[in-house]
Image (spheres, rainbow, N blue to C red):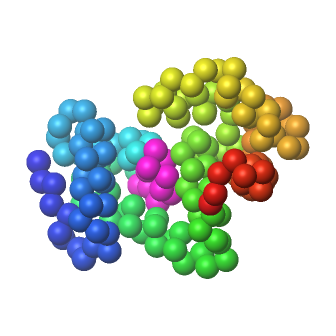
Amino acid sequence: MSTSTSSHSSTLSREQLAQLKAVFTYFDTDHDGLLTVKDAQHVARLIGSRSDVFDGAPKDKKIDLSEFVHLIEAAERVDDVQGSKTPFHLAVSKMYRGLDVGDVGYATQDKIQAFFHTTGDNIKPRLISALVNDMDHTLDGERFTEEELKIFLKKRAEKGDFVY
């Protein structure tokens, strides 16, 4: 299994590369040094990166660590060149990508529950339901969009719940 990421010049720090390698290795359950496109998209969402960089790849394709790192870097460059977005908007977009499984344009209570389950956190469904209801400003049915998440977080920051 080759885990070299030196086939191209990386813009990531050694620490970032080590973190990507660790998460890649964690999801490489058969230890063949490859992830399916579906698994790579899942990992990208979990780390807050754009999963759409894998969209053009055939579903049966396997991705090695070097290609995974290259695609994650490309996703980060897309975020970096979107100059109209503030660091707050970029952070919320990354967080939202982790919740919007399947890139359908909204997140639901089930998706949030699954996200926290995947990260190992056991959040009570009642708390997640309250969170979703608080974010669903358009009242379109226990789901929320990226824009609604931004509004929710800005209001919470204005109340002093956290600083961004």
Q: Would residue 86 be visible to someone looking at this image?
A: yes
Query: Magenta span covers which residues?
Result: 44-57
Point 53% across, 69% down: residue: 79
Which residue is situated farthest in the left direction here? Answer: 1
Residue 12 to residue 145: above or below: below
Q: Would residue 105 be visible to someone looking at this image?
A: no
Q: Is residue 63 left or right of residue 112?
A: left
Q: Position of residue 46 (x, y in %)?
A: 46, 44
Residue 84 to residue 131: above or below: below
Q: Position of residue 16 (x, y in %)?
A: 31, 61
Query: Between 70 and 118, which is closer to the camera in this rendering?
Result: 118
Q: Position of residue 91 (x, y in %)?
A: 57, 59
Which residue is situated farthest in the right direction here? Answer: 139
Point 25% across, 47% down: residue: 22
Image quadrant in which the C terminus is located: bottom right
Q: How many marks?
A: 0
Which residue is situated farthest in the front direction here? Answer: 160
Q: Is residue 52 left or right of residue 141?
A: left
Query: Between 91 and 25, which is closer to the camera in this rendering?
Result: 91
Point 77% across, 56% down: residue: 158
Q: Is residue 57 left or right of residue 127?
A: left
Figure quadrant of residue 88: bottom right
Q: Is residue 96 left or right of residue 153?
A: left
Residue 51, magenta (yes or no): yes
